[in-house]
């Protein structure tokens, strides 16, 4: 996650939810990760603020360290959608489905990061 991505997320998240995020900076990765339950709350907040989720990555926490699982999801380009609203709703739907499916199949010991659309979302 680049600094612009982090800045955009920090702008809209309540401080308590941001505080539950874990920075992976010590691993040289410019991302924050959240447990599944918090990740679902973040999706709701991002969508209410009209910030589409382009995709995300999954990390496991084992032996006191985070590890990339190389799993993740993404949505098509904004320009593959009929409207900005369709893009926003599909990005929300895919993120929710992926996180719910992942935690249901693999358990709760996973963390999720987000890549968001950092440009103003028009119609």
Image (cartoon, rainbow, N blue to C red):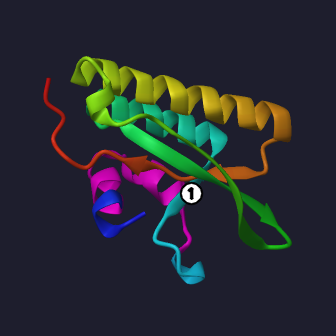
Q: Main structural element of the magenta stretch: helix, strand or loop?
A: helix
Query: Which image quadrant: the N terminus?
Result: bottom left
User: Residue drawn at (41%, 34%), measured in percent from left and top?
Assistant: 76
Image quarter of residue 120: top left
**Left or right of 87: which side holds 71?**
right
Q: Nearer the viewer, residue 57 or 20?
A: 57
Image quarter of residue 77: top left
Residue 95 screen position, x and y as percent: 53, 33
User: Residue drawn at (33%, 26%), measured in percent from left and top?
Assistant: 88
Local packing at callout 1 (Cα closer than 10 Å; few below 14, some 14-19, many 20+) is many
User: Residue drawn at (72%, 29%), measured in percent from left and top?
Assistant: 101
Residue 108 screen position, x and y as percent: 78, 43
Query: Which image quadrant: the C terminus?
Result: top left
User: Residue drawn at (56%, 28%), measured in percent from left and top?
Assistant: 96
- How many marks overall? 1
Residue 68 shown in magenta: no
Q: Nearer the viewer, residue 87 or 81?
A: 81
Residue 7 screen position, x and y as percent: 29, 60
**Left or right of 99: which side holds 12?**
left
Q: Nearer the viewer, residue 77 or 99?
A: 77
- Asked which secondary structure carries label 1, the reply is strand
Residue hosting label 1: 33
In the image, is residue 7 above or below residue 64? above
- Magenta segment boundaries in residue numbering: 6-24
């Amino acid at each position: 996650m680049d600094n612009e991505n982090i800045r955009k997320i920090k702008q809209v998240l309540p401080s308590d939810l941001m505080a539950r995020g874990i920075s992976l900076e010590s691993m040289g990765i410019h991302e924050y990760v959240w447990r599944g339950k918090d990740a679902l709350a973040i999706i709701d907040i991002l969508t209410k603020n009209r910030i589409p989720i382009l995709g995300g990555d999954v990390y496991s926490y084992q032996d006191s360290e985070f590890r990339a699982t190389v799993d993740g999801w993404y949505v098509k380009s904004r320009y593959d959608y009929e409207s900005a609203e369709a893009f926003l709703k599909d990005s929300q739907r895919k993120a929710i489905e992926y996180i719910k499916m992942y935690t249901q199949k693999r358990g709760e010991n996973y963390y999720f990061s987000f890549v968001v659309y950092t440009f103003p979302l028009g119609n």
